[in-house]
Each structure stands twice: as C-alpha cells, then as structure tokens.
C-alpha cells in the first residue's frame, strides 16, 4: 500500500493544464510537417506554414497554441495499491484545473448549466475518467478538448449486418459533414464496440494515443491506415480550402460488444490535438 | 499576390473582394461570439443601440485567452462561425458588413451577404498565438460579465485572412475543393 496525498494530484494537474495547452506533442508536430512537405497547393501550403509558425510561437513564448483551451479531460489510472489521503480526489483535480487555467492565463470556457449557461469562471469542473489498474502508481493524462471539433463528433448504433463497410462509410460521413468547421487538418478518434457510452469514451481515448502509433491488432492497424488515406482523398484540405491534408492522424480503439449491436463513435479533434501524461 | 486592405469595409471595398483572395487586413474590428451576439440582437429587437456603430463594421468571432502581463491580448484565433448564423443576417441588416471566423455558413447568411454586400473572411483556426501578433490594441467595450465572450474593440495590423465567401455568394470551400479534386 502506497499513500499519495491528493495535493500532489492538484500540483500535477495544474502543471499539465498549462503544458498541454502551450506545447504541442512531438508526434502531432511531425505529422503536420510531413503533410506540409506533400502539399502542392499554394493556399494549402500557406495554411500549414502558418500552423507550424503558430505552434513555434506558442512554444517559444509559452502562450496557448489555440484560444480554445478546452474543457479539461482528466484520465486517471489509479493503482489498486494506492491509498489516497489528504482530501477528496475530485476536489483536488478541480483545484488543479482552477489553478492551471488561472495561473496559465488560459481561457475559462465552461458554463455551469448546459441549457441555462453561465460561465463558472475557473474552467471547472474537469471531466474526470477514473480506472483502477494493478500497481501503486497513478497515471494522469490531461487532454484539453476544444469544442469546435467536439461539436462535429457523432455516434451511431449499427446493426451487426452493417459490417465493416458500415463503419468505413460512417467515418467518412462524419468527416465530410464536419468539413471546414473543426479546423482541419483534423485528428480522428474512432471507438468501436462496448456500449453506447463506452464507444464514445473509446473514441476520446483514441485521441489521447500518439498519432504515430498503431492499434496493436493488425486488422485495426490496417483499417487506421486505410481510413486516413480515404479521408485525405476527400479534398477538404487544410482549413477546408482544398488540398491533400484533411486529417493528420486516425486512431481506432475497440472493445467486445453485444451480439445485437455494433456501436461506433467518431470523436473529431483539430490539428491542435493536445495531451500530456505524468506518472505519480 | 496578397492584397493589403484597410477598414472600414465600405460597400465599394467589399465589391472588390473575391472568394479565394488572400488579404492583410488593417483597421478597427470588434470581437463577439455566441453570448455577445445574442445580447446584441436582443438589444436591436428592443430598439436599443449597439455598444458600437455597426456601419461598415467588421466583427471577429473570437473569445481570446486572458492577456499575460505586458501583452495586448492572449491567443486569439477564430471560433466556428456557424454558431453565429442565427444572428449574422440581423447584424448585416444594421450595417455590419464584415465577418471573420472559420467554417461553413448557412444559405440564409449567404443570401444576406448578397443583399447587404457582406464579406466573410477566414482566419486560420487553431493559430491563435500567431493571430494575436497582429492585434496592436484591445479595449473592452461592453458585456464584461461574459468573460472571454465580452465585446472588445481591436486594432489589427496586417491580419492574414482569406476571403471565404464574397458578396456575390462565391464560396472558397466549394471552389477550393473542386479545384483540388479536379487536378
């Protein structure tokens, strides 16, 4: 049994909020640069040049890459041999978000009620996802999620007879419908299987995985490659102005599901796909 | 290739801008997004004046991050314009001709643009740190309680934009994609 004070989590979450919003992950930077090298349209090249210049400014001046510094999605993998002390876990995470978004000059984008609105003023509450795993560590992943792209995400409950083709068509349909709205080039997270809610969670988790990684199952690894190619044949291009680069990455996560169903969720993200992980 | 333009966005100037034109924009613009537009349109419905003169004005759909000490503004890239579609025709009807944002617009917005000689400019979504460099002055003018969504008056210099939809209804999202796929 290892004791961890929740105050440690507050500090880690504060730091991750700021770092994730200021420094774009290396895998995303590499993908953008590779796509820039392949583009031949003048406007598309110009857009990608500006996107590269933008994340370089953010790195150098420690300012947010994008003004939509997102809702703070916090994924916790808590070792079952950890004993949390010193207070309430949820309060500690929210305090970290509050400090991170205030001290990091990040935008407060959360309203306290979905219908009646009203900004909470400190970007809380965080969206917290906990998982109990073996061991005595806590793995914290923070992914600030912007809503220009979140709004373009969709879920569908397929009949099993729709098969692989149904999934493929749906992914393309979601990207096509999103068009220029989610600030392409996009990153696409796909969740297949589980239940209605689990499929959506899988899609979000897919966005937390580096885009230069592959699904460990070769069947889905091949599907990731195929669907990314197909998306990039749509011609939407950087910012929707036309071009080769509509998406820079596509990750698929799956779970077993019911004999009667085949849920599929597609979570869209933009070229500012941010996530940062720390292990306590 | 890139053309420099200076505001205000008169009808005469608007008519010279075409979908696909890359411009560097200089002048005074106003920030507003969801909650600000809702309030402005409620004011207009009650016959009350807007917090700024909308004649030939350009509105930037943006909610910036807070300014760090010693800076004018935080990161300030465009938000998705489609959420302002419910309000844009009303804003154009009182003279606000220019819109800066990103993403698709509804046909009724394009119709209003044809009627009032409106122009829809695209700024690069997700390039908030870069776009902030063009903003030389920032003054909060109304709706302070809305935080990031408050109304701000900005002075921008050489802001890099692309004309997405012009006042004849030509649309770069359609033209650009067709051109690419036609290659």
Image (cartoon, helix red, strand yellow):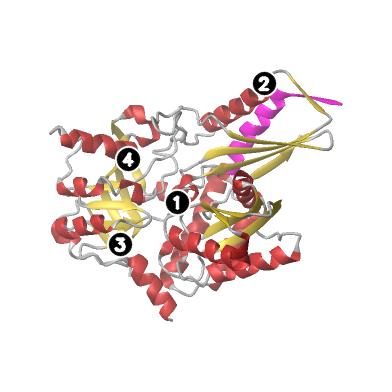
Mark 3–mark 1 distance (CA, rounded to whole Å): 19 Å
User: Closer to the camera: disc 1 or disc 4?
Assistant: 1
Sequence-first disc among 1 and 4? 1
Q: Do circles 3 and 1 both sit on a common chain?
A: yes
Task: Look at mark 2 in the image and give the residue it sits on.
Answer: A88
- Residue B160 rendering spot, x and y as whole percentages: 36, 57
Q: Residue at x 68, y 54 (%)?
A: A259
Sequence-first disc among 3 and 1? 1
Are the residues flagged by discs 2 and 4 in contact, CB closer than 8 Å? Answer: no
Question: In which quadrant of the rendered view does residue B18 lie?
Answer: bottom left
The disc numbered 3 marks a residue on which chain? Answer: B
Instruction: Tell me if residue A21 is in the magenta stretch.
Output: no
The main secondary structure of the magenta stretch is: helix
User: Closer to the camera: disc 2 or disc 4?
Assistant: 2
Q: Residue at x 51, y 47 (%)?
A: A65
- Residue A136 rendering spot, x and y as whole percentages: 83, 33
Q: Residues within 10 Å of mark 1 (few under 14, many from 20)?
A: many
- Residue B92 rendering spot, x and y as whole percentages: 19, 49
Of residues B105 and B59, which is closer to you in this image? B105
Mark 2–mark 4 distance (CA, rounded to whole Å): 43 Å
The disc numbered 1 marks a residue on which chain? Answer: B
Q: Is residue A272 left or right of residue B107?
A: right
């Amino acid at each position: 049994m290892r004791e961890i004070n929740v105050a440690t989590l507050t500090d880690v979450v504060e730091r991750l909020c700021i770092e994730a919003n200021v420094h774009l992950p290396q895998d995303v930077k590499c993908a953008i640069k590779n796509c820039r090298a392949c583009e031949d349209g003048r406007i598309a090249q110009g857009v990608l040049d500006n996107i590269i210049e933008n994340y370089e400014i953010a790195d150098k001046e420690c300012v947010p890459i994008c003004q939509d510094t997102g809702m703070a999605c916090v994924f916790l993998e808590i070792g079952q041999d950890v004993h949390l002390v010193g207070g309430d876990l949820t309060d500690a995470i929210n305090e970290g978000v509050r400090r991170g978004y205030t001290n990091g000059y990040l935008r407060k984008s959360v309203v306290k009620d979905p219908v009646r609105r009203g900004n909470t003023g400190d970007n809380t509450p965080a969206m917290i996802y906990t998982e109990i795993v073996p061991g005595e560590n806590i793995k914290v992943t923070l992914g600030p999620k912007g809503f220009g792209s979140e709004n373009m995400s969709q879920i569908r409950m397929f009949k099993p007879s729709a098969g692989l083709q149904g999934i493929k068509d749906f992914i393309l349909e979601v990207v096509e419908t999103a068009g220029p709205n989610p600030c392409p080039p996009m990153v696409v997270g796909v969740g297949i299987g589980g239940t209605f809610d689990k499929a959506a969670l899988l899609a979000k988790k897919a966005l937390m995985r580096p885009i230069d990684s592959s699904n460990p199952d070769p069947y889905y690894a091949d599907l990731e490659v195929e669907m990314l190619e197909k998306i990039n044949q749509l011609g939407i291009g950087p910012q929707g102005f036309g071009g080769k680069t509509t998406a820079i990455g596509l990750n698929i996560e799956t779970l077993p599901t019911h004999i009667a169903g085949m849920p599929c969720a597609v979570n869209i993200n933009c070229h500012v796909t941010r996530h940062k992980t720390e292990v306590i | 290739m890139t053309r420099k333009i200076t505001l205000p966005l008169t009808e005469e100037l608007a008519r010279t801008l075409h979908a696909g034109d890359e411009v560097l924009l200089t002048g005074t613009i106003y920030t507003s997004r969801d909650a600000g537009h809702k309030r402005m349109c409620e004011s207009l419905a009650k016959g009350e004046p807007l917090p700024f003169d909308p004649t030939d004005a350009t509105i930037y759909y943006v909610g910036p991050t807070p300014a760090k000490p010693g800076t004018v503004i935080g990161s300030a890239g465009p938000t998705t314009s489609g959420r302002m579609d419910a309000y844009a025709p009303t804003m154009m009807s009182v003279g606000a001709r220019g819109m800066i944002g990103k993403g698709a617009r509804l046909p009724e917005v394009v119709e209003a643009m044809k009627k009032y000689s409106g122009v829809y400019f695209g700024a690069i979504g997700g390039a908030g740190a870069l776009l902030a460099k063009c903003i030389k002055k920032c003054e909060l003018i109304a709706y302070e309680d809305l935080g990031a969504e408050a109304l701000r008056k900005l002075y921008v210099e050489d802001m890099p934009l692309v004309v997405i939809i012009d006042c004849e209804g030509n649309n770069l999202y359609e033209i650009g994609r067709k051109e690419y796929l036609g290659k």
